[in-house]
Image (cartoon, helix red, strand yellow):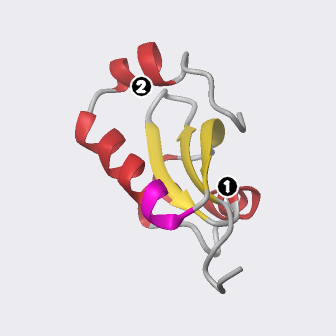
Amino acid sequence: MKKNEGKFWVHILENPSGAFYIGQTSNLQKRVSEHNTSAVRSKYTAKHGPWRLVWSECFPSRSGAIFLEKHIKKMKSAEWIRKDLLNRKSIDK
């Protein structure tokens, strides 16, 4: 296995007001924790948290995860995420 091969996750986090954060990572549990830890979270997640994981999908390559992350972000629709994506069965959900 090459150094950068493994599991890569696309994930959607939701905050209490119903806003979504979409991202990708190679360590899902660690990244979700980072979004809720004040020392390492981004300005956006710090201002709008706490966050909970509502959806994830695993890919064997980072390029596949990045492709889906960009596709979801292009949709720019919380309604689409709620109706279509969150109801879609993910292999690793």
**Most foreground residue, 53 or 25:** 25
Label of residue 82 in the image = none
Task: Pinpoint residue 83: horizontal percent, then vertical percent.
Answer: 43, 13
Q: Disc 1 on helix, strand or loop?
A: helix
Q: In this image, 36 relative to 69: left or right?
A: right
Q: What residue is rendered at 66% in x and 86% in y?
A: 3
Task: Pinpoint residue 53: horizontal percent, then vertical percent.
Answer: 65, 40
The residue indicated by pointer 1 is: 32
Q: Choose top left, top right, bottom left or bottom right for residue 55.
A: top right
Residue range of the region highlighted in magenta in the rendering = 61-65
Task: Pinpoint residue 86: horizontal percent, then vertical percent.
Answer: 54, 22
Q: State the residue lying farthest toward the front.
A: 1
Q: In this image, 46 relative to 55: left or right?
A: left
The relative height of residue 52 versus residue 60 in the rendered view (above or below) is: above
Q: What residue is rendered at 62% in x and 22% in y?
A: 89
The residue indicated by pointer 2 is: 81
Q: Is residue 5 magenta?
A: no
Q: Choose top left, top right, bottom left or bottom right for residue 44.
A: bottom left
Q: Is residue 62 magenta?
A: yes
Task: Pinpoint residue 41: horizontal percent, then vertical percent.
Answer: 56, 67
Task: Identify residue type, mark 1.
Answer: Val
Quadrant showing the C terminus: top right
Task: Identify residue type, mark 2.
Answer: Ile
Q: What residue is rendered at 58% in x and 63% in y?
A: 25
Label 1–label 2 contact, CB within 8 A: no
Task: Decide: few, some or many residues near mark 1? Use Cα within 10 Å; few <14, some 14-19, many ≥20.
Answer: some
Quadrant showing the N terminus: bottom right
The relative height of residue 32 versus residue 71 in the rendered view (above or below) is: below
